[in-house]
Each structure stands twice: as C-alpha cells, then as structure tokens.
Image (cartoon, grey):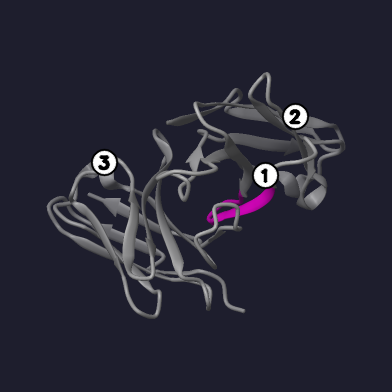
Amino acid sequence: KAGVTQTPRYLIKTRGQQVTLSCSPISGHRSVSWYQQTPGQGLQFLFEYFSETQRNKGNFPGRFSGRQFSNSRSEMNVSTLELGDSALYLCASRSDRVTNEKLFFGSGTQLSVL
Amino acid sequence: AQSVTQLDSQVPVFEEAPVELRCNYSSSVSVYLFWYVQYPNQGLQLLLKYLSGSTLVKGINGFEAEFNKSQTSFHLRKPSVHISDTAEYFCAVSPLVGAGSYQLTFGKGTKLSVIP
C-alpha cells in the first residue's frame, strides 16, 4: 500500500507569489490534515478535511486555504507569500475521523520564499 | 486549549546508554498522548500513543513511555539507544472530544544525538 504522497518535494517562490501544494492520502483514507513546521514555531496545525469538508482550522491567516477532492486528494494554497511562510508543510491522512486513529504523515513539501 | 512542553531541546547520549526525553502537557480536558519521531528529510512516524488503561505504553523500536496524570507528564524512555535512534522526537496531545479533537498539538521537539 502506497504511503502519503506529497508533491512537489521542494519549492522555491518569491514574495507575493502564490503556491499550491498537493497531498495524496493512503488509499481508503478520507481524512487529510495539514501542518506547518518551522524552526521557530515548531509544528502547527493548519486544517483538516474529511469527505471534502473542512472540519477544523488552525490559527492561520486567510492567505492559507485548502480543499479536498472526491478522491480524497487534497491541495493547500498560500497566496501572497511572505518570507515567514518558508517552512516544511506536512500532510497526514487517517482512515476515519476517529481521534485515536493512527495518523500517517507524508515526507512534506519544503517551501522556500525568497 | 492544550499546550505541550518538551523540557530539553537537545539530548546527547552515548550508544547503548539509557535515555529519557521529557514531556509535560497542559489541558483543561482529557487528552490522548503521542510520541512521534522524525528522521532527517522525512515526515513523522508514530512511536507510541496513550489512550487509556495501563499507564506504561510500549511502542516501536524498543521505546516506552509512562503517563503520569498527577504530574501531567508523558516521558519517553529507551533502556539502550542505537546510532539509528538519532532523530528528532515530538510529544503531542489531542483532546478526547470537542472541536479540536482531530488536531494534534505538538511540543517543540527534542533532538536526540547518539554518540558512538
């Protein structure tokens, strides 16, 4: 069974641009979560999608948005990029919205904003 | 709201020595507790989790953790470390119920360096 796949692996953008990151969950998993990891702030929850609906959102500005498709694949979009958006963005999936269900993480997309 | 404090940002330890990585949490509601490991340039992998029952939890790669409700701690231990244990370790919590129950709150991480 393939794991959580995130593309691209690395991305370089300049301030003011927008970016879209993609996440393909494990087959059969309907819940997809996104986390931002930075050296200063650590790991922070961005949002969680289940069956194409956003059910939880972290404390991030509206420039950060996401969506989930009918095949459970998810995309995350960041508009008007700022230097502080440079981070590793991790996607995680699980089979159902059960809180103790094991989360499977992808290897992440490393975003650098210049 | 929940918060997690990992008391040591870096822990160097000699190979085959024991190690303890400390984690304290704060929450107004009951929580599930987790330890994750992150190897360089990789995502997070679950080591172990505490949901209920026995306070001593055994995980993968010989790690174990003990939940102490009175001290709100969930320290991770391994009796003998290997070079391959060099990684960053994250403690995390999530509420049992409520709007935030599907998100993890992480500590800042502890970098474990195993010295040959």
Farthest residue, direction top: B71
Who's the residue at 83% across and 47% down the image?
A: B62
Residue at the spot of label 3: A84
Please tell me whether mark 1 sits on a helix, a strand or a loop.
Answer: loop
> Which residue type does callout 3 highlight?
Gly
Splitting the image into 4 quarters, where does residue A38 fall? top left
Marks 2 and 1 in Cβ contact (< 8 Å): no
Q: Percent from the top left, x then y, of residue A93?
A: 50, 64
Looking at the image, is mark 2 or mark 1 earlier in the sequence? Answer: 2
Nearer-the-camera pick, B52 or B87: B52
Residue at the spot of label 2: B20
Labels 3, 1: front one? 1
Give the class, few, some or many, for how many residues have Cα within 10 Å of label 1's Cα (few <14, many ≥20): some
Q: Percent from the top left, x then y, of residue B46?
A: 64, 52
Nearer-the-camera pick, B51 or A7: B51
Between the residue at mark 2 and the residue at mark 1, the CA separation in whole angstroms equals 21 Å
User: Do the residues marked 3 and 1 share a common chain?
Assistant: no
Q: Is residue B42 magenta?
A: yes
Which region shows up in magenta?
B38-48
| A94 relative position to B51: left or right | left
Q: Is residue B90 magenta?
A: no
Q: Is residue A108 above or below residue B106?
A: below
Question: Please, which chain is the residue tagged with disc 1 on?
Answer: B
> Which residue type does callout 1 highlight?
Leu
Residue B51: which numbered mark, if any? 1
